[in-house]
Image (spheres, rainbow, N blue to C red):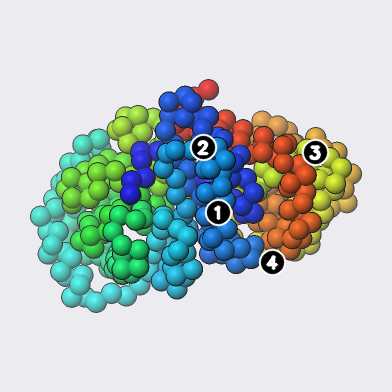
Amino acid sequence: MKLGQYSFGIGDRFAHQGIAQLNAIIKAKELDVDVIPVWNKSYREHEIIGSKPADTRQEADNAVRARGWRNAYFVDADHIGMKNVDFFLKSSDFFTIDVADFIEKPVDQKKIDLFVRQHEDYIGELNIPGIDESLTISKERIEEIARKYLLAIEEAGKIYAYLFTKKGQDSFVVEVSMDETNKSQTPVELLFILAGLSKKEIPLSTIAPKFSGHFNKGIDYVGDINQFAKEFEQDVAVIQFAITEFSLPPDLKLSIHSGSDKFSIYKPIRQALNKFNAGVHIKTAGTTWLEEMIGLAEAGGGGLALAKEIYRQAFTRFDELSKPYATVIDINKNQLPVPEVVDKWDEEAFTSTLRHNPINPRYNSHFRQLLHVAYKIAAEMGERYLKLLAEYEKIISKNVTENIFERHIKPIFISDK
């Protein structure tokens, strides 16, 4: 199976916006830009919602049938490990193998020594097309990388081998994720990670390293944009070099997790893609859930009332809701409006505070992040919430489609405008 040059992961907490999401992909197709949709949902999200991978598969299949989509599409088992891979086997054809927990874990010294011997030809100054400066590689550096990443590489190999025995060859695509760690990977580290993965004969479609800066949920990138641009471009160059050097799949590309709403880095991403004629996978998180909230509030009446109720509960349950996402949110509680104030807001006040528009003086990133992690409350409401999604479907779907196409797909894959 082939993922294609450009792919876009569309998270959908409640599996109600599949058609609206696919409409954004179709709008790109109408402009001769092929973007492959990937419906993604993690084990954690399924647990919180009480859903199953079959629900995500059904959403994707129904949307594809309804809109007559004839191109490829995928359902991603997002951030899986050996403990939960079986949960996704039947419904998924895209597996994001998360090995972050195995980074810097002890590994047998004999395996480290073997890894160093296998790659000692790279010791010295290595020139990679597309990177201005040469990469300095020493025996000690290779050993350090092996000590840090070798167990993670081995775990990726184990999970892929298990998937292969269960699903067969060429029936799914594979991503390896190392982004949920404390430190970003350097181009040299990425090079030898890819070298190690190639020896496991994993047919990688994408790899998700950690970049410098903060990729917090639902808000813009926080960090040095120039540094990110340099890292991203160098990683693209390393991948293209590694494809030939280590006989990796020719369509291997970078994946950016929590890529939703990282508006400030979209331009350097596109510039690098154009420079190298490279591909990318952008994985969004809860943007669609937030567009549901915006649509409900915009509708007024019962929709606005429910949005305010969800915020009130989120405010009082701050610690509970924030804990699972502590590493990917940055909320200053002092910057959150109290529920008594929010209760007095009209449709415009609520939506302007929540919608990610940094030039709007009402926009509040702390308010947005808290609601981003508050989908558990909507899940607890059950049919009450879902009925309002159906009632206000038209206004919600408009927001979902416009958000994905105008604010994500266009600036990454189409133009600066």
In percent of width and height, residue 85 lies at: 44, 68
Q: Is residue 341 visible?
A: no
Question: Crowdedness of circle 4 by 10 Å Cα count: few (<14), some, many (20+)?
Answer: few
First in residue order: circle 1 vs circle 3: 1
Nearer-the-camera pick, 16 or 325: 16
Specify the amino acid type for callout 4. Answer: Glu
Q: Is residue 176 left or right of residue 122?
A: right
Gap between marks 1 and 3 measured at Cα: 28 Å
Question: Crowdedness of circle 1 by 10 Å Cα count: few (<14), some, many (20+)?
Answer: some
Residue bearing the label numbered 4: 320
First in residue order: circle 2 vs circle 4: 2
Label 2 element class: loop
First in residue order: circle 1 vs circle 2: 1
Residue bearing the label numbered 2: 68
Residue bearing the label numbered 1: 58
For the residues bearing labels 3 and 2, Cβ distance under 8 angstroms: no
Question: Crowdedness of circle 2 by 10 Å Cα count: few (<14), some, many (20+)?
Answer: few
Instruction: Name the mark on residue 299.
Output: 3
Question: Crowdedness of circle 3 by 10 Å Cα count: few (<14), some, many (20+)?
Answer: some
First in residue order: circle 4 vs circle 1: 1
In percent of width and height, residue 402 lies at: 62, 33
